[in-house]
Image (cartoon, rainbow, N blue to C red):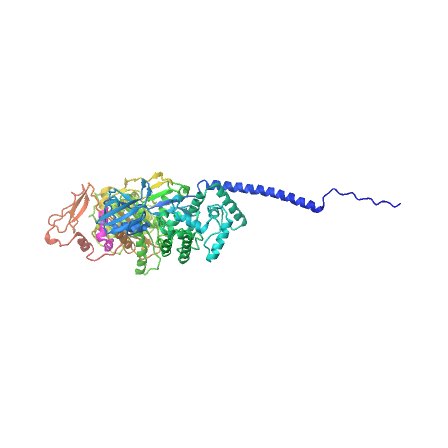
Amino acid sequence: MAARRPTRKKSSKPPLMRRITWALLAMLVVVGCVGALVLAATLIRLDGEIRSKFAGARWALPAQVYAAPLELYPGAYVSAGTLTYELRRLGYRALTQLEGVGSFVERNAQQVDVYARAFDFWDGAQDAVPLSIRFADNRVASVSQARSGEPVTIARLDPMLIGSIYPQHGEDRVLVKLDEVPGLLPLGLMAVEDRSFYEHWGISPKGILRAGIANLKAGSVVQGGSTLTQQLVKNFFLDRSQTWARKINEAFMSVLLEVNYSKGEILEAYLNEVNLGQDGGRSVNGFGLGAQFFFNKPLPELMPHEIALLVGIVKGPSFYNPRRNAERALERRNLVLRVWRDDELINEETYEAAVARPLDLAGSDGRGVERYPAFVDLVRRQLQAQYSDDDLTQEGLRVFTTLRPQAQEALERQVIKRLPEIEKARKLDDQSLEVAGVVTNVEGGEVLALVGGRNVRFPGFNRALDAKRQIGSLVKPFIFQTALSRPDRYHLYTWLPDQPVEVKMAHGPVWKPQNYDRKFHGDQPLFNVLAQSYNLPSVHVGLDVGPAEVLKTLKSAGYSGGAQPLPSILLGAISIAPFEVAQMYATLAAGGYQVPLSAIREVLTADGEPLSRFPLRVRQALPEAPTYLTNWALEQVMLMGTGRAAYQQVDRSLSLAGKTGTTDDYRDAWFAGFGGDTVAVVWVGRDDNKSHRLTGTSGALPLWAGLMHDLDVQPREPLMPADVQSVLIDSQTGLRADQGCQAPVAVPYLRGHIETLAWAPCSEAARPQVDSPVDWFLNIFQGGQPQPTR
C-alpha cells in the first residue's frame, strides 16, 4: 500500500503584501501623528511669537527731532517773504484761496493768509486755524483769524521735522493711525496689492490667480500675488531668505495673524511697516515717513498723484526709487492711477489731472527728513547726558530743538557758495577746503544753526564739534579782557609797545614771536592793537598779566580744555572746537553773562507728556564793565581793523563786533563775531592740516559777513554798565579832550579811573580837520592805506 504524502499545515500568517500594507499604514499613522504633533508645536510656537511681538510695542520708535517753530505775533521780526518761504519749506500749498489745512494765499506784500496745521507743542495743542497775517516794515503788524477777524495774540507754524535718532538697525518711521490716513490710500493699496483683503484668511489662491491674469493682460506687473497679510508677515517677522521653510512659515503665520487680529489692525500695521526706500544708513518705513521723505508733507495732505506714487513704490522701493529712476517711477505711478480709475476709486477728471502732474518730489538733493545731520548729532550728544540709547531710539520721544531753519539754510548757502569761490580765486585745489560754522543767539544760548563740513546735508565727521584747531588771534580779546579787568594799569587808550619779544622756554629754544607783516609799528593804543591784530603788543600785555591769568579768563568764558599756561597761548596756540569758540564769544556778546549753549528746548514722550525741561542757566562769567570795554574794541576791529571788509556785504550802519584768527603757516582761518542778537563762528581749513595760504580775513570773513547779511541781524545797542562812563579823548595824544580838541573820540572808561587821565592841551591850529573818528583812525594808524590783515 502506498504511503500517503503528508499534507502541509495551512499557515496562520497573512500574505506578504498584506503585511507590507499594514506596516506602511502603521508607519503613516505614526508619521502623521508625529507630523501633527510637530505641526501643532510649530503653530503654537508661531502663534506665541506673533502674540508676543505684535501685541506689544510693535516697533522701536526713533526720537523725532523738530526745529524751532516760526512764531507769529505783533512786532515779530518776520517779513511776508520770510513767512512764505517758511510755508513752502513746510510743504504748504500756494493757492489763490484757502482750501483747507496746509494751504496759503499771498494776498500782497503786506498780507498773507494761511491755514495753519494742528500740532501738539510742548506747552499745549494748537488747533488747525485759518490766519490772516499783516506786515509793516518787515515786521508782523497783526495776526487775526481769517474768517472772524478776531485778534490772535500768538500763533505758531508747525515745526519742521529735521531728523530722527534711530537705532543701529536703521529703521525709521512716523506712526499713523488708520482713521487718520486719506481714504484713498487703503482702498488704492488693496486695489493694486490685494483685492480680496477683506475676504481671505491670510493667503489667497484665488488672488494669486487673479493677479496673474491681470498682469498678463496689462503686459506688466500691476497686481501682487501675495496678500497684504503675507507681505506684513514677511517684513515684520521673517528674514529675507528664499527657502521653502520660510515660505511655509509665512503661510502659517499669515493665517495665525488673521485669526488673532482684526483686518483693521493688520492694515494699520502694514501702513506703518512697509518699506518705501533707503536714505543712507536708515530705511524709510511706513507711509507716514514716506510722505515726509518724498513730499515734505503730512500724510493726510497728500494728493491722489502723490498717494499713487507711494503705493507704486511698494512693489520695489529700489527699482521704483523716484529720485534715482524718475521715468520708471512715473510710469508705475500712472499705472496705479489707471487701476484706480478702472475700479472707479477716482473719476476721469481726477485721473487726467493726476497723470498730468510731475512727480512733485520735495527737494533736489535726494534726501528727506534727515536734513541737518550735524545739528541732529549735537542734539543726540546733549540728550545722551540724560537718556540712554534705548530711550532715544525706541521710545518715540519728541525732541523740540532751537534750530531755526532760515538761519541753518543761510549758513549752508554761504558754505556752498563761498568755498568754491575762495578756492578758485586763490588757485586752490577743488574741494580742498573744509569748513565748520556755528550760529547762536545772544541772550538765550540757543544754537540756531550748525554745519560740520562742506557737504552740509550728509553725515560724517562733525568738525563743528570735533575738529579742535588752533584759534590764532581769536585769543586776543581774552588777553585784553584780562588786562582791562585791571583798570589801574590798563584802559582802551593805554599805549602799548610794538617791540621785539624774546622768551627763554624752560625746555626749548627762545620764543621770538613776530607781527603778521614782520614790521614794527611804534607804540599803539590798546584798542588799535586789537583792531589791527598786532602780535607783539598783545604778547607784551599777555606776559605782563600772565599767561595763567589769560587762561583763567578763557576758561571763565567757556574753554574747557587742558591747555597749559605757556606764552604760546598768547598767540592762539591752543586747540579749540568751533562750538566751544562760539560759547566763548557768546559770553562776550552777552556782556560777560554765560548761558551754556543748548540745542534742546523740550522733550516729550510719545504720548505728549513732558520729560526733562532745559531751563535757562545764566551766570556771570566775566566782569561786566571790562567786557563792555572789550566789546567796544571789537567794534573797532569791524570799523577800521581786520574785519572792516565785512561792511562790503553788510550795511555800515549795522554795529557789529568781531575778530579774525589766523594760525602759523596759514593752516586755520577763523572769524568770530556778533551783532545785537546773533553770534556766529566760522572756521575754514584743511583736514590734513596743510597750509591753504588763507587768513581769517580772506578765508573765513567772507562767509561770516554773507551770513550776517542773510540773517538780517539786529545792530548792537548794549546798555552801558553803571560803572562805565564815556569820555572824550583827544585822538592824537590819547589824553582827555578839552574844548580846543578837534574831532575827539568818545571812549568808554571805568568810573573811578578817569580822574587820573591828563588833559590834552589842544589848539585848533595843531589839530587836523577830519570827518569822523573812523576817518581819523584810518589816517593816523594806517597812514591812509589799508594795513596787512590778520
* Residue farthest along the right direction in this orientation: 1
Q: What predominant SS class does the magenta segment belong to?
A: helix
Total numbered labels: 0
Position of 386 compared to 654: left or right? right
In the image, residue 14 lies at what x, y percent?
Answer: 72, 44
Front residue of 668/491: it is 668
Residue 724, percent from left and from top: 19, 42
Where in the figure is residue 542, as x and y percent of width and height? 27, 47
Between 605 and 726, the one nearer to me in the picture: 605
The reply to whether residue 432 is in sight is yes
Q: Nearer the viewer, residue 345 or 127?
A: 345
Q: Is the residue 421 above or below the residue 62 in the image?
A: below
Q: Is residue 573 visible?
A: no
Residue 785, how many percent across, how many down?
A: 21, 58
Q: Is residue 544 left or right of residue 340?
A: left
Nearer-the-camera pick, 131 or 96: 96
Among the 4 quarters of the image, the one containing residue 41:
top right
Q: Is residue 139 magenta?
A: no
Quadrant (top left, top right, bottom left, bottom right) of the N terminus: top right
User: Where, quadrant-wise, is the C terminus in this rendering?
Assistant: bottom left
**Which residues are drawn in magenta?**
630-651
